[in-house]
Image (cartoon, rainbow, N blue to C red):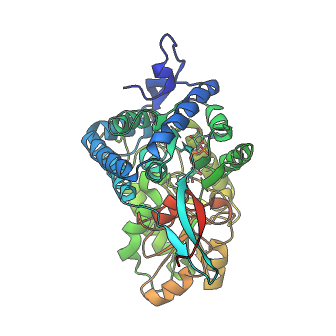
Amino acid sequence: MPTSESDRVPGRQPARFAVVDPATGETFDEAPDQQPDELDVVVDRAHRAWHGWRADPVVRTTALRVAANAVEAAGDDLARLLTREQGKPLAESHAEVARTAARLRYFADLAPRTRRITDGRPVHSEIRWRSLGPVAAIVPWNFPLQLAAAKFAPALVAGNTVVLKPSPFTPLATRLLGSVLATALPEDVLTVVTGREPLGARLASHPGIRHVTFTGSVPTGRAVAEAAAASLARVTLELGGNDAAVLLDDVEVDRIADRLFWAAFRNCGQVCMAVKRVYAPAQLHAEVVEALAQRAKTVAVGSGLNPETRLGPVNNAPQLARVEQVTKQALADGARAAAGGHRLDGPGYFFAPTILTDVPPGSPVVTKEQFGPVLPVLPYRSLDEAVDAANGTGFGLGGSVWGTDLDRAGAVADRLECGTAWINHHAELSLAQPFAGVKNSGVGVAGGPWGLYGNLRPFVVHRPQEA
Ligand code: NAD
């Protein structure tokens, strides 16, 4: 089943690039290295397919439901490939496949509401909703399938067609997903393209694209916004985070330690809205460090294919180098590793789960997004100091407050400058909620009906009032 234009052009031999298994550090497969000039044909076909696809919402709803079933039916193959190229434990890959199908089902049943405005004038206005055209979906390597679905499911049900570009670190499961979706969708309604830069840059600036929906780092998000400005395409950016967890003085450390640990270390810490900094009251700081360090020292780290594994490798060599660099810098700044603090010997991109204490607040492991299995735990003396520190970075994706008195915790959560705040947990999302970062963490809104309307434009008809 062809999933890209290069696969379809007879006689054209696409260049290919290596895909590495992060658990071994070895190449285990290749993917087509599509060239930017191929996008003209891909986007043109997406544009032609749009005319038929936008016509009938019932066809779209049915197709998305069929697609969800097809994804579940291919779940074993998708999950295994995802673990090979991404590194996460197989159980987490299965969960990601399930969330991919869930997104298709959720959006399949959403439809925009036509509204009528009557405001005393002799006409009324009817607000209808129209699709935009071909949408470019560009996604990172940490959750390739579910982040892609969070983009293509609302875009498709709205009547748009989609060109989906995964990260070159994780192209294979997305290509397989494209093949699976092709069994449920008309031709060219969703096309997966794979390749190294400047493929993404060219896609973001392509004049035939009407909405660029991007998830990734802040610097690339800026480049995408600049590129899309060329054609004035709509831009939705879901960018990095540096979420703080603020522990209150009535927190029961034993009760929350597991949840807090996994809120930071799930997917090896490679989660945009992972807990990336913990602020603990000074009198509880040692107990919190000890509880987290004990878990970091004993968690099973290894290949995601091993059923015992709870933490896999870092996804790729440049990311491992960033995690190592930021940790070394913290240690040089005077921090102490209560657990980990170094790469693990042997093949693969493994980094020991790391809990840092005595970290100077200005160290990059606190001020930047480390995006790996490293967590600084910082003491505070007053709640105002903790809230100021939590809000004191350029990011604003999420944040959490942990304590026994829920009203008090809720009042502190209210003071966090972020898009989503949690009490006594972190990073749980509902499909029906809006998801948006503030400050450098994003532009636009994804999730729920807001994600649907982000893929539509209003079309207003004024007509005389009925006599
Ligand atoms: P990245 O910005 O390096 O890459 C993201 C995607 O953009 C990849 O597909 C990449 O190939 C592509 N790309 C690279 N250069 C491009 C360019 N000039 N123009 C267009 N596309 C380009 O990010 P990453 O390292 O793959 O992912 C990690 C980052 O993603 C972290 O910062 C993380 O916080 C963020 N993230 C955010 C969310 C969210 O919802 N806010 C979710 C997951 C990850």
Which quarter of the picture shows residue 405?
bottom left
Would residue 52 be seen by someone viewing this image from the given angle? yes
Q: Height in image: 170 above or below 389? A: above
Q: Nearer the viewer, residue 39 or 55?
A: 55
The image shows residue 342 at horizontal and vertical percentages of: 53, 47
Q: How many marks?
A: 0
Q: Height in image: 201 above or below 325? A: above
Residue lying at 61% horizontally and 61% vertically, measured from the top left: 444
Residue at the extreme top of the image, as rendered = 11
**Residue 268 in the figure: left or right of residue 168:** left
**Residue 86 in the figure: left or right of residue 199:** left
The image shows residue 380 at horizontal and vertical percentages of: 61, 78
In the rendered image, the quadrant that contains the N terminus is top left
Residue at the extreme front of the image, as rendered = 467
Which quarter of the picture shows residue 335?
bottom right
**Residue 44 in the figure: left or right of residue 300:** right
Would residue 92 be seen by someone viewing this image from the given angle? no
The image shows residue 293 at horizontal and vertical percentages of: 45, 62
Q: Nearer the viewer, residue 421 or 162?
A: 162
Q: Nearer the viewer, residue 338 or 43?
A: 43
The image shows residue 344 at horizontal and vertical percentages of: 47, 42
Q: Height in image: 225 above or below 433? A: above
Residue lying at 51% horizontally and 21% vertically, measured from the top left: 6
Residue at the extreme left of the image, as rendered = 73
Residue lying at 46% horizontally and 74% vertically, measured from the top left: 287
